[in-house]
Amino acid sequence: MEPTRQDQRTRRRPLGPTFVVGAALVGLVVLFALISFVWTPYDPTRVDPTVRLVGPGAEHWLGTDKFGRDVFSQLLVGARTTLFVGFIAVGVAAVIGTPLGILAAMTRWRVLSELVMRGNDLLLAFPALLLAIMFGAVFGASTLTAMIAIGIATVPSFARLARSGTLQVMATEYITAARVAGRSTLAIAWRHVLPNIGAVVIVQASVSFAIAVLAEAALSYLGFGTVPPTPSWGRMLQESQQFIFDKPLLLLWPALAIAVAVLGFNLLGDGLRDLLDPRLEERR
Amino acid sequence: MLSKRLLKVMAAPLALLLAACSAGSTATAGSTDTSLVVAFAVEPENLDFTKTAGAAIPQVLLNNVYEGLVTVDDDGKIEPALATKWTVSDDQKTYDFTLRDGVTFSNGDKFDADAVKFSIERVKSAEWTVALKSGMDVVEKVEVVSPTEVKVVLSKPSRDWLFRMTTRIGAMFSPNGVADLANTAIGTGPYEVAKWTRGDSIELKARDEYWGDKPAMKSVTFKYFDDPTAMNNALLTGSVNVIGSMQAPDSMSQFKNDSRFKVIEGITNGEVVLSFNNAAGPLQDIRIRKAIKYALDRKAIVDTAWNGYGTLIGSMVPPTDPWYEDLTGLYPHDPEKAKSLLAEAGTPNLELRLRLPNIPYAVAAGQVVKSQLADVGITATIDLLEFPARWLDVVFKQHDYDMSIIQHVEPRDIAQFGNATYYFGYNNPKVQQLLAEADQGTAEQQNTDMKAAARQIADDAAADWLFLFPYLAVTDANLSGVPKNAITESFDVTSITRS
Amino acid sequence: MSNSIRQLARRALILIASAAAASVLVFGFMSVLPGDPAEIALGVNATPDAVASLRAEFGTDRPLYVQYFDWADGLLRWDFGKSYVSETAVGPQIADRLAVTAWLVGAAILVALLIAIPLGTLSALRHRRFTGLVVSGLSQLGIAVPAFVMGIALIFVFAIKLGLVPSGGWTPPTEPGKFLSQLVLPALSLGLIQGAMLTRYVRSAILEVLREDYMRTARAKGASSMRTLFRHGLRNASIPVVTVLGLHMTTLLIGSVVIERVFVIPGLGSLLLDAVANRDLLVVQGVVMLLVIAALTINFVVDVLYVVLDPRLRGS
């Protein structure tokens, strides 16, 4: 198979600072999550009334919360929740949205294409938070249901992107050549379309990841997020907001962690875009 | 250069907006002498407590807007209200009430014996749908003797009935005032509803023609906050005067150490119950139920979940009930005993579903319970159920749970342990008989029977009582007359004064 | 021209079909919500008889399709039905709350534009220089903060520590002083973050415009860069920005629920949350339908504008 155009471009370009910073921040979150599998200073769910609301120190690096749980341990395990949140939401959106978009662009039946894109518009009319609240009411509050809802609400972004990307690819000469050569539609989609729109999808995925992390925090605040005692940065924020007077640090740590993750994925997305789409970079 | 100038042009309106806003920022709400703003968490869905359960409606309306023949004071004693006095026949079945003269409803109607007959009979009719109406089942008939005298005849003696008359079912309505109860409340009380801004607040206004002492506050606004921190902030910045029910006890210290505020700690009727499903699943085994009770350190639960506020109780009886007995020593914290009971029951690696309503105290206490159970080898999985809708459906109606945590707020709700179909699934004929006898006997017998029932329920480990929910109020330092306890459904604002 | 009219008719037809599909979706969703409004109204100790009679009163004992057509029929006449819980008409309830949220969202958009236009322009003009980098960095940081954290922090500083404004609450604009003092913090919390987001759109829109030929021509002719930018640049850049704002409108309307909760504002979002909790189904259906129809209509208007404004899109 001939190398795709994207491949040739990537090789030439140096990594931008945006990409590096973004990747480093995302790496930090991943590192936290990985560490949490092998080691945490304390059991993050163990309640210990004798060490309630201890300040940062040698025993508890970032202090403890009102249940006497170690904040640093919770932050470490919370990174897992954050990654889980993003993967589910983005996974659902990309796995449903991308094929739909390709289908809409490639199908010969106009009705089908029209139906997919109108359905897409309809879905776009349901705000993500609204869907998450409704899903929470129907299936019960949990991280999974909330993120599936966020994922479904994000489907249209991926579908639109995939469709316009596919239309561009379809207009190129080598697709015409492939068609003339009698390749099946499925083979064309798999061999040529997907690799070519892969880059934009990944960029979108990175940005959607950041949005999902913020959505989890908002839903936790409203009580539709992660179920306790599973550590989650959003819920840590929600639980510690009443301590803004006495222990503002309790609020700071999870807020910082969320900011790092969101910033990381947003920058990573921007960096990837610069990297993969030189046309945009030149224009900046 | 261009960008700098542009920035200035664009920034000017923002600065203007900020200036305009801070100009009008003096805290004004509730700062006049005769108006008061009280903060609560749960807003009433409507104004009709005859059809809608829950404490939010009577909290604002009972005693403030509606009054009954009798009322209950801060210590749980029955006092005259619209009835000046009453006599009870020797067979305990006939009550003769003498009514207060010159009382009017807020629509101008006169309060008289016909209104009493109408109100009591209405509770028995299909118009009332809340379950509490069963308190009136025992009434056989109501007779109007004269405009100021009413005779109520019970079908059997009931110690409980007069007490129930102090709750919402004893509220007096005017026959012409019940057309639109959901939106219009017409009572004999010192206040009437002046304005309701849905989603925000209910404003009560003092009535000039009230029969009794006029309240000091001419206007009282009940303001509702979904978010506990927002409620605290409102008090700190002076936009409310009273927090009627503190939802974030961990923030109490900021008020205690501030001379601008006064903290009131009292008790409620709300037993925070760790309920067990006695009828299905692993908790049918009394050894496991007892093991759980031994595994729990209730002091630690109150300390961590509710910042140490709340009274430990060993049974379903709050200390304000006459038959209260201290049973807190029955199940001391003893993890070893818990483990041996579990071993005896032959259930290693026990897994239980702890299905919690998404209410702050339940979520907080549930996490501590889970952690303490883990220490004796029980894995409790927490499910959060949206309250009320899903919790009612799953736990309360379908009994699809092993353990749950909820506050039982109704007065004298120990009676629910006599109901085998209740979600506890607790069926002990002995307890059922004791509870039935208690209602019909003398005051002494009632005391003995109720004590025996409470002890039996605790012996059977039918549930665990984590703590008695505290009444925590915070007020401006210059207020007095704020209720000291919350043992009724009402938050009585009639005697609040400002110095 | 007839081509455009046919285009418009087609879009209108799609709008109507989508709205109808949405109503079925929304109703279907409500009917699978666990929890029975009658049971919830009656509370924990309700008798089965009472529940049955209340169900009959609500009409929730009828077959689903009857309930649907009853509701849809009302919708067509702009009648949202009567709430199970408050026993008042749903329409006016939603209108009251919408009015509140509209003020909040409007003010937030104003704040957002006041931030995004100068900053976005600045960072576009200076995009390879330090200032541009700082602005881009700040906007990235702004997006990374959860809205309610922003709200809590603003309350802490401006309401509690400095005592400049109330910590929350809502007063109708009939009392302008109080209204503004209570509006400023929530509008800022929502607006700062939206502003950070919008800054990026403005930046790329302006960058795009700066590359256009007419801008180069204007500059080459010696027109001052300030005037050129105002005359041509901002106007052209505003089209994509307004489109983005329009498409995000419903997200903003519902997304403000978090800020409404932090600042105790009786808006549309809190109505929705309360209604979901109490299974006040007609209110939930009403709010959701309203938002969906609003989104579809905005979409439609954007489509129509494109057809009308952009000759290249005609006939495609």
Image: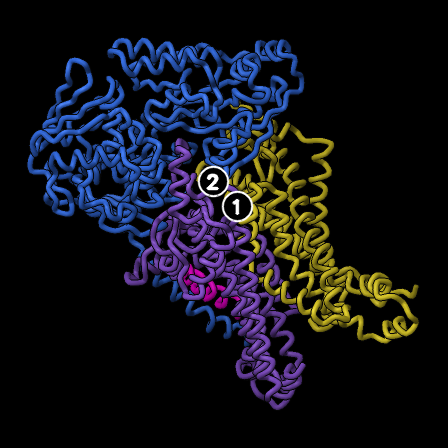
Chain colours: A yellow, B blue, C purple
Q: Are marks 1 and 2 in contact (CB under 8 Å)?
A: yes
Structural crowding at the residue carrying mark 2, measured as other residues with C-alpha within 10 Å and reported as few (<14), some (14–19) or many (≥20)? many
Left or right: where B147 falls relative to C112: left
Left or right: where C189 falls relative to C92: right
Asked if B202 appears above or below A66 in the picture, the reply is below
Asked if A118 appears above or below A151 in the picture, the reply is below
> In the picture, which quadrant includes the N terminus of chain A?
bottom right
Q: Magenta residues, as a range?
A: C100-121
Give the quadrant of residue A21.
Answer: bottom right
Residue receiving disc 2: B389
Task: Where is residue B353? Give x, y as percent.
Answer: 58, 28
Q: Are marks 1 and 2 on the same chain?
A: no
Please check the rendered image and state whether residue C115 is part of the magenta-colored stretch, yes or no.
Answer: yes
Q: Residue at x 12, y 46 (%)?
A: B108
Label 2 amino acid?
Ala
Task: Where is residue B440? Give x, y as percent.
Answer: 27, 15
Q: Residue at x 88, y 72 (%)?
A: A179
Task: Where is residue B195? Give x, y as percent.
Answer: 25, 51
**Circle 1 — which element?**
loop
Instruction: Considering the whole magenta stretch, tell me its main secondary structure.
Output: helix
Q: Residue at x 24, y 34 (%)?
A: B492
Give the quadrant of residue B149.
Answer: top left
Structural crowding at the residue carrying mark 1, measured as other residues with C-alpha within 10 Å and reported as few (<14), some (14–19) or many (≥20)? some
Please state the chain letter of the residue tagged with numbered disc 1 in the rendered image.
Answer: C
Residue receiving disc 1: C33
**Circle 2 — which element?**
helix
> In the picture, which quadrant includes the C terminus of chain A?
bottom right
Q: Residue furthest bottom?
A: C221
Asked if B468 appears above or below A35 in the picture, the reply is above
Say how many tags the image has. 2
